Image: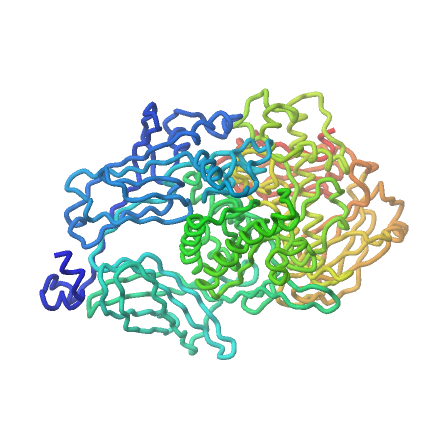
Amino acid sequence: MAQVWTSLNWGLLWLVVGVLPAFSSGEEQRLQLSLNGKWRLSNSNGSLHLPAEVPGCVHSALQRQQYIQDPYFRFNDVMYRWIALDNWTYTTTFTASPQIRVKQKALLVFDGVDTVASVSLNGIVLGKTDNMFRRYDFSVRDLLKDGENVLEVAFLSPVLYAAERRNAHSSYAVPPECPPDVQKGECHVNFIRKEQSSFSWDWGPSFPTMGLWKGVRLEAFDILQLVQLSSLPLYNRSLSQWRLQVELLVDAVQSFHGKVEISVSELNSKRTAPTTFLQGKFNYSFTLNINQIREVKLWWPSGLGDQPAYLLTVRAFLGTFLVLHKESRVFFRTVELIQEPIAGSPGLSFYFRINGRPVFLKGSNWIPAHSFQDQVTPASLRNLLQSAVDANMNALRVWGGGVYEQDLFYDICDELGVMVWQDFMFACAMYPTEDDFIQTVREEVVQQVQRLKSHPSIIIWSGNNENEAALATNWFNIPASLKPTYVKDYVTLYVNNIRRIVQQEDPSRPFLVSSPTNGAESEQEGWVAANPYDPHYGDVHFYSYFLDCWDWKTFPRTRFASEYGFQSWPSFSTLQPVSVQDDWSYSSNFSSHRQHHEDGNHLMLQQAALHFILPNSTFPLKRFTDTLYVTQVMQAECVKTQTEFYRRSRSEIIEGKGHTMGALYWQLNDIWQAPSWSSIEFGGKWKMLHHFAQNFFAAVLPVGFEDDDDTLLVYAVSDLSHDLELRAVVTVYSWADLDSVCTLTSSPLLVSGGSAGVIYKQSVAALLAGCGHCTRLTCLLTFHLQDEDGVQHGPTNRHFLCSPKDAVGLQRPNITAKVQEDESGFTVSLHSAAVAPFVWLDVGNIPGRFSSNGFLMVTRNTTVKFVAWRPTSVGELSGSLTVTTLTDIY
């Protein structure tokens, strides 16, 4: 019968032969059998046989069955190298019901295979996989048996495969060959399409994973299967009309004539289109004009408005028989990347307009939340993303050396109003351009864009991380004579393939070839600019560990800062579960092993020593925990200074530079328990930096600094859509006394929405002269913004007139703390005997967070809330609570 069906019109056959009379009405019954759950796992020589969960990976399975310890414990990343050097096979058996086996088509679908594998069913090889970022499906109807079916996925070592691919590429090197020794990683990761950081990075371990990292299922159907539904809202400004571009990726058993019905009922918009579905897998595109009678509610970034969704319904019919029914959420918003000349400045602007409104992007960079993706839970994802929003962030950059995140990540970003800068997964390397490599990348890009483009949170695609800069500034010491070869490969991969596909698949968003880049200027220079870090164009990555981070003049006044940052260590409570007592020293082998950035531990203390007295306790554990604390103080203060510089630069051009419209520091989250640039520790605990971000990303913010001639300037920065009339209130305190010395208030000034400007200006010498017996060494300043009614807008900020290590009169505050509980939750009441900088509250391993932390205490009493992430008690919190201030560490 199958042979006859392939030669006749599908619909005609049903009518003439009457094969399935029920098709005249009703709905096609597609069947799906999940193959997730228990599989068997074995290594190449058969010495290990164990149960394994799918989705999952080899490391997780070995740990769950106690063949290995926690891979994150102490030095286990190196001890367990053997796992990635072996080949592993996943096996399962399943029964396909008669109802499945009589369907016209049956597919084995793998949503994610990590990475190089051969897939067999009942001893017959179905095909091979070579790309972690692709979905694979195999037609298996004729191979399914009555009774048990055996499915086997045989994985090759990704490390050995990458080495073989590199050795086969003999005509010229594709650098880098290996990561720096300090990273303790594996080589040639650029030759395999898997998470690039899984072979190590400067903030993470080397765990080259293998496994079925996403779901596996059997799908069976008679007529068609919807593989992917995506929708793009497009706005016609001249007509003031929205239209919805709806795309269906459909796998049809046979060609047939039918009709597709698309509707957004809440907007009273519907369309029915006759459609010929062709045999095989094809994309079908439909345009639904949105009824102009109804007002369309727009999706806005966090802090600027709501994130309303509408329900899109898609149905397809063969006659009156329903063959497809799918619903999905659809959001309406526009995004533009504006690169145009700026008056009084060379170069071009670089900023985003959402729904026609310029938006300053405030946020961070996202890396994989775990080395083993099957251990990233929905709760941990939501916690991290909610933490970003709670710190007043509106944007995250999904960095190009990790993974395209799971659907839930983008769903939460849609819901919370977090804009996503989405890199493609290429980072800090050159890449080969053989036909098979390009072909698998093309399929990867098509699938990922189709999967993700319906999300309003994604506002830009970027081809890679730092590869333009690597080429332009010759990171890999490529001889000048060979540079054209690598530029040609670069253009082939990112421009002629990835860019072309993205622009064809998604006309609704901008595309950048790289980050950092000069954007339109890089394009003019043949896609690789002479200086991709030029602050007059595009986005900039900037790191400086040797210069004083308190000196804002060391930072580039760039159009958009998409990476910058400083390292710190996590809390002792985060390190303790993966270490032993011998490790609890800054000079221990463990501390050295955990640091994957060259000389990173020394650089942190070197930067901290510029402004702070370093810990000198004679008790080893106290000295260690004090050192962890001072690295967090240093990191928080450095990133605060740099971010505030970028925020106050949004409205001005100085020496041709400025109009900064984005600040995304490196990095939000951690992949393991180690020193890194993150503001949130592995496990979700906020570092001091993240508490600072809550303030320096506030919608209204006062920023204070001194210019070259020792004049204090206070800027009022506003991200609001409306204007405010504000004045600056500057209060002077003595380090030695909790009573303020004097208070100065500026005249009221109109602060326009979406602007930054000077609201207070006075020489420090004149300010101090008019304020008692203050000197730079004995006094400090706080300042805030308030309206004519005395209502404060934004947080209170502060300005140190000298380094804290030089402060005269600074005393031990001897803070006492009392934990209480009422109907609103837990509070901690603090009493201080002196001015206390960088007050840090810690409750050890009790998960949760304080409403404020790392703060300057200039009052005798203050109260802080604590939100617990698990049940706890006043007694447990009181017993765990420690309070550390700057003077407590020396």
The residue positioned 54% from the left and 48% from the top of the image is: 399
Q: Is residue 324 left or right of residue 643?
A: left
Instruction: Answer above or below: position of 331 versus 268.
Output: above
Name the quadrant of the N terminus. bottom left
Q: Position of residue 19 (x, y in %)?
A: 11, 62
Q: Position of residue 589 (x, y in %)?
A: 61, 23
Could you tell me if residue 395 is visible in this image?
yes
Instruction: Answer above or below: position of 784 versus 113.
Output: below
Residue situated in front as seen by the camera: 522 or 382:
522
The residue positioned 67% from the left and 51% from the top of the image is: 643
Q: Is residue 708 left or right of residue 549?
A: right
Instruction: Answer above or below: position of 330 versus 846.
Output: below
Residue situated in front as seen by the camera: 368 or 497:
497
Name the quadrant of the C terminus. top right
Q: Position of residue 26 (x, y in %)?
A: 18, 64
Q: Position of residue 444 (x, y in %)?
A: 42, 52
All told, the count of numbered labels is: 0
Residue situated in front as seen by the camera: 405 or 845:
405
- Colour scheme shown: rainbow
Could you tell me if residue 818 is visible in this image?
no
The residue positioned 78% from the left and 51% from the top of the image is: 731
Residue situated in front as seen by the camera: 703 or 740:
703
Q: Is residue 587 left or right of residue 492?
A: right
